């Protein structure tokens, strides 16, 4: 296991890395925090050792490269902690190496085409940032040019030049963001080159990824995360699996070979469109994906007399609200597998599920974000027999 301490010269300014200690020390630090949260709920023997990375560097498959005019030159970087000032990052140790190379080339092309970076103070300029995604398995890359509402000059020629200079880039899209200060994609997206998505392979399944798609940023650890979650779900070929907060359908599609039926529910309509496309891409015929509120969807299943044996949920950092927990308890699945990137809200929700008659079978932390304080954790639970 890698032992060196974080060596990034921007450590105190960038904020991308938060832990300046050896990787083994980071894993110990994270393990202790998981144990503090869950030891009293299930005992130490049910908490697995955290799954770390063999090489905890250059793991991020998504890069947000903010561009600014600095000293008359176009430079890219990330926002310094709690500021609108960027820290120039020429070679980030967390970002995919190809994404680092693409980022540098894009700023040079901006200078060649005389395209001005956006200035949030004056509200002038064109390009705010580049969103770069790289598929680990296929090597395909996507560049999303995020602009102010100002029309981008020579956009087609620029996109063509990107693909000619960078052979890994298979598609270039343009997104108009009307948010002045925030790094958020807008609703208006135009495909300039390619088909608007790249294809990656995860746990032997193919996934098309668009600019808007939520896709875990650490593909190597994601395979460990999903494989562990599916193993802990103890799926049978007679089971119906409900995948709550299913996103683009990754978990449900990966698990589809092991169950009779997959039901996926997600509030984001574009994500559901991606999930249906990904199911078709993998010739998965036993998965149904629905756009809507997960709690309301479970209520509908109860009314119809349908009862999934297993529920896998992977909510946002805020966790599940009280209504969702109530609906899940009414659905009363035999097994629940709860994946979370926030162990504080996960602990809160697990306590509520314990009150509803569930017991913890296993707690399995996975280090998805080396050199940061973030911890991903799986908690598997079963309905206690009366």
Image (tube, helix red, strand yellow):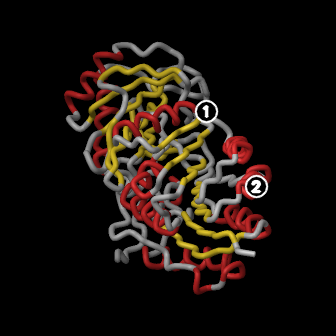
Residue in front for this viewpoint, 222 or 299: 299
Is residue 67 visible in the rendered structure shown here? no
Q: Is residue 242 left or right of residue 383?
A: left
- Return the x and y of residue 380 as percentages of the image width and height: 59, 69
- Return the x and y of residue 77 as percentages of the image width and height: 44, 43
Q: Quadrant of residue 359?
A: bottom right
- Return the x and y of residue 115 as percentages of the image width and height: 38, 21
Classify mark 2: residues with Cα within 10 Å, few (<14), some (14-19) or many (20+).
some
Q: Quadrant of residue 160?
A: top left
Judging from the image, what secondary structure is the residue with disc 1 in?
loop
Classify mark 1: residues with Cα within 10 Å, few (<14), some (14-19) or many (20+).
few
Residue matched to label 2: 330
* Residue 110, above or below 295: above
Q: Residue at x 23, y 34 (%)?
A: 166
Considering only order in the chain, which callout, 2 or 1, is on the residue closer to the N terminus?
1
Quadrant, the C terminus: bottom right
Q: Could you tell me how many numbered marks the image carries?
A: 2
Circle on res. 2: none
Cα separation, mark 1 vs mark 2, equals 42 Å
Q: Residue at x 75, y 68 (%)?
A: 351
Nearest to viewer (mark 1 / mark 2)? 2
Residue matched to label 1: 181
Quadrant, the N terminus: bottom left
* Residue 328, above or below 277: below
Is residue 208 visible in the rendered structure shown here? yes
Residue in front for this viewpoint, 256 or 163: 256
* Residue 232, above or below 316: below
- Return the x and y of residue 103 as percentages of the image width and height: 34, 39
* Residue 282, above or below 309: above
């Amino acid at each position: 296991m890698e032992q060196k301490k974080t060596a990034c010269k921007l450590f105190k300014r960038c904020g991308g890395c938060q832990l300046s200690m050896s990787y083994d020390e980071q894993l110990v630090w994270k393990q202790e925090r998981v144990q503090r949260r869950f030891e009293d709920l299930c005992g130490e023997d049910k908490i697995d050792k955290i799954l770390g990375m063999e090489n905890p560097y250059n793991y991020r498959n998504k890069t947000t490269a903010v561009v600014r005019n600095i000293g008359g030159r176009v430079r890219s970087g990330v926002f310094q902690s709690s500021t609108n000032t960027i820290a120039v990052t020429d070679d980030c140790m967390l970002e995919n190496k190809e994404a680092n190379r693409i980022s540098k080339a894009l700023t040079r092309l901006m200078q060649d085409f005389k395209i001005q970076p956006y200035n949030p103070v004056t509200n002038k300029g064109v390009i705010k940032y580049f969103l770069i995604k790289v598929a680990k398995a296929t090597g395909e890359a996507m560049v999303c040019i995020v602009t102010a509402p100002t029309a981008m000059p020579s956009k087609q020629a620029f996109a063509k030049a990107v693909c000619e200079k960078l052979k890994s880039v298979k598609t270039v899209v343009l997104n108009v963001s009307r948010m002045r200060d925030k790094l958020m994609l807008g609703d208006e997206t135009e495909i300039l080159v390619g088909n608007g998505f790249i294809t990656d392979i995860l746990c032997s399944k193919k996934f098309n990824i668009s600019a808007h798609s939520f896709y875990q940023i650490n593909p190597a650890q994601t395979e460990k995360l999903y494989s562990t979650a599916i193993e802990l779900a103890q799926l049978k070929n007679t089971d119906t699996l409900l995948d709550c907060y299913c996103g683009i359908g990754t978990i449900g599609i990966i698990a589809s070979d092991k169950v009779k039926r997959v039901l996926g529910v997600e509030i984001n309509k574009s994500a559901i469109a991606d999930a249906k496309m990904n199911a078709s891409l993998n010739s998965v015929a036993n998965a149904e994906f629905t756009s809507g509120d997960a709690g309301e969807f479970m209520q509908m299943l109860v009314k119809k007399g349908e009862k999934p044996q297993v529920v896998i949920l992977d909510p946002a950092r805020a966790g599940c609200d009280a209504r969702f927990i109530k609906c899940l308890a009414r659905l009363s699945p035999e097994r629940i597998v709860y994946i979370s990137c926030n162990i504080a809200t996960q602990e809160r929700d697990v306590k509520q599920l314990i009150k509803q008659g569930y017991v913890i079978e296993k707690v399995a932390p996975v280090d998805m974000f080396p050199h940061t304080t973030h911890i991903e954790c799986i908690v598997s639970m079963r309905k206690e027999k009366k």
